[in-house]
Amino acid sequence: MSTRADRLTWSRNDALVAVGAAAVDLTGFAFDTQFEGAPLAVTSAFFVVASALPLLARRRHPVVVLAAVLLLGAVANLAGSMSSHFGLTPAVALYSVAVARRPAVVAGAALATVPLTSMGQDGRLFGSGAGVAANAGATFLVVVTGLLVKRWQRETEANRVLLAERAVAEERRRIARELHDIVAHHITTMQLMAGGARANLAHDPEAAREALVTLEGSGRMALSEMRQLLDVLRAGEEPETVPPAPQPGAADLDRIVTESRLAGMETEFTVRGAVRPLPPTVGLTVFRVVQEALTNARKHAGDARAHVRLTYRPDEVTVEVRDDGPGSGSGGGTAPARPLGHGGYGLIGMRERVALQGGTLEAAPLDEGGFRVAARLPVAAGAGAADGEEATR
């Protein structure tokens, strides 16, 4: 549906340009006639003002506007036999052609501008040699300026497109990290839940039923989060009628800790400090760090225990996940070193998430065995409690 602005052939800025060009050229014409001691020719003054009116449409029809300006200017020159000059009106019209049209059209417009702006000057049909040379120089300067501005506009547009493409690529990277975190965590949990249900099906049906219920919920959650992320890729489609579910945060850590326990890894969860709401991006980062760290622990730590500790401080929040599984420190025995995830989105994705929030991440094996992941995220100062206040779940 077109708007009123779309239907207009000229804008307020175009009107200001036309009025300004007419005023400048009329002032110059008046000074020329006074300097030469000749009476002010009303007919020439009228055509000087009229030649600026086509500038209203210079953006949509620059070539036609230039032709009209040159013809009206030539009539004004022939009617008044003005001295050699190159007015602001033809300069603006020629500049508009140089910015908007191909080089061949610009060259033709420049070749037509020089003789038409020289007609009738100094009482001659095509003016004096000095006048023609001056108009040719002015034409050259206007064309060069227009071409330079056109080049600058193209470079600016190319940079804008490049920045937009980079933003899209970064968004796709973010989606890839989100999908990795979701799939790795939920699929690992579902695999372990299925194995636990199968092992307990004969002698402990209640435990098997609880594992299957958790498996079902984990699968449903994975599908919901994946669908929410993939909706970001649907550009240009109809808007969603149902608002997406909120992103998980620090308040959802209980859920993934419970899933870790049901998957067979003994997991302790400790919160220190006064619990307070976190910014959504910080809360999501805390959630994903714990999710990825517990997933890696279940994959690589074997029969181990994990401890998740979330600490609220006045100006930051820290989260630490450590396990006592195999490590590669000096005291860790002969167990193989745990993979650090250099080839995938695991720890690299965690580092990127934390860095985007202005925080730091440490991920390394412990000397006494096991592995530790710790993230420190700055948060605006708020209400806090003494460091000794602690709750264990």
Image (cartoon, rainbow, N blue to C red):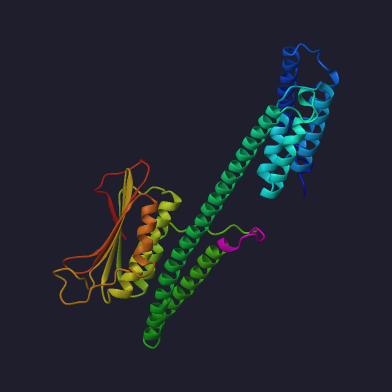
For the stretch drawn in magenta, the main secondary structure is loop
Q: Residue at x 72, y 19 (%)?
A: 27
Compared across the picture, whether 323 is left or right of 71 comes to left
Q: Is residue 367 above or below residue 381?
A: below
- Position of residue 128 measured from the top left corner of the image (x, y, whole percent): 73, 27
Give residue 148's quadrant in the image: top right
Tell me if residue 235 is in the magenta stretch.
yes
- Position of residue 343 measured from the top left corner of the image (x, y, whole percent): 35, 70
Quarter of the image for the C terminus: give it.
Answer: bottom left
Residue closest to the eye, 349 or 393: 349
Instruction: Specify start and end residues of the magenta stretch as a single range.
Output: 232-240
Compared across the picture, whether 147 is left or right of 86 comes to left
Tell me if residue 63 is in the magenta stretch.
no
Residue 286 visible = no
Residue closest to the eye, 226 or 104: 104
Residue 236 visible = yes
Q: How many marks?
A: 0
